[in-house]
Image (cartoon, grey):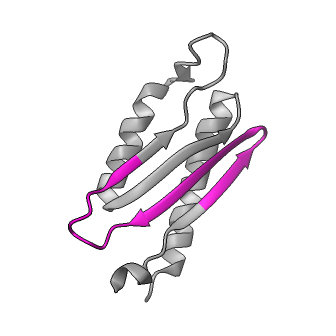
Amino acid sequence: PLQAELPAARFLAPLDEGLAEVVLQPNVDSKVEPSLHYALAPFGSQPPAGRKFVGDLRLELLSGFWGALAKGLNATLTVVKVRGENAHHIVESSFKAFSRALRAWMDARPS
C-alpha cells in the first residue's frame, strides 16, 4: 500500500529551555481528512493567563495557521510543546521542528 511508502516524519527541536515536537503524516487515502493536534499553550506563567503575543504575533492565531497548513498539505499534523515557559522559544521551536520534519519527510519520499 502507498501509505507504507509515506512514513510519518517526526522531529523534536530544542531552543534553550523550550522543546517542541512535530509529527507530519501525509494522507494518501482520500477518505482520511487532514487534521491537527495542537498543544503549545500555555505560553509561560506570567501573566497568570499566559502570554498573548510574541512581538506582533498574536499567539491565538497559531492553531489556525497550523490547521490551514495541515489542510494544505493534506496531512495529519501534530504540534506539541514538550517543555518550556518562554513563549518565544516555544513558538520558534515549533517552527524549527516543523521545517525539519518536512525536510525529513521530503527526503524519505520515493523518487
Q: Position of residue 71 (x, y in %)?
A: 30, 53
Q: Residue furthest right?
A: 16
Instruction: Name the magenta segment's main secondary structure.
Output: strand
Res. 76 image quadrant: bottom left
Of residues 103 and 11, the one nearer the viewer is 11
Res. 6 image quadrant: bottom left
- Residue placed at 44% from the left, 87% from the top? 110
Q: Quadrant of the C terminus?
A: bottom left
Res. 41 image quadrant: top right
In this picture, residue 17 sits left or right of residue 20? right
Q: Position of residue 24 (x, y in %)?
A: 47, 61
Q: Position of residue 64 (x, y in %)?
A: 36, 37
First to last magenta residue range = 11-36
Of residues 97 and 79, the one nearer the viewer is 79
- Residue placed at 64% from the left, 31% from the top? 88
In this picture, residue 64 sits left or right of residue 91? left
- Residue placed at 60% from the left, 26% from the top? 43
Q: Quadrant of the N terminus?
A: bottom left
- Residue placed at 67% from the left, 13% from the top? 46
**Relative vertical location of residue 13 with respect to residue 109 in this rendering, above or below:** above
Q: How many marks?
A: 0
Is 22 included in the stretch rendered in magenta? Answer: yes
Q: Position of residue 39 (x, y in %)?
A: 51, 38
In this picture, residue 76 sits left or right of residue 51? left
Q: Residue furthest left?
A: 31
In this picture, residue 24 sits left or right of residue 20? left
Of residues 72 and 6, the one nearer the viewer is 6
**Relative vertical location of residue 49 with respect to residue 4 in this rendering, above or below:** above
Q: Residue furthest top?
A: 47
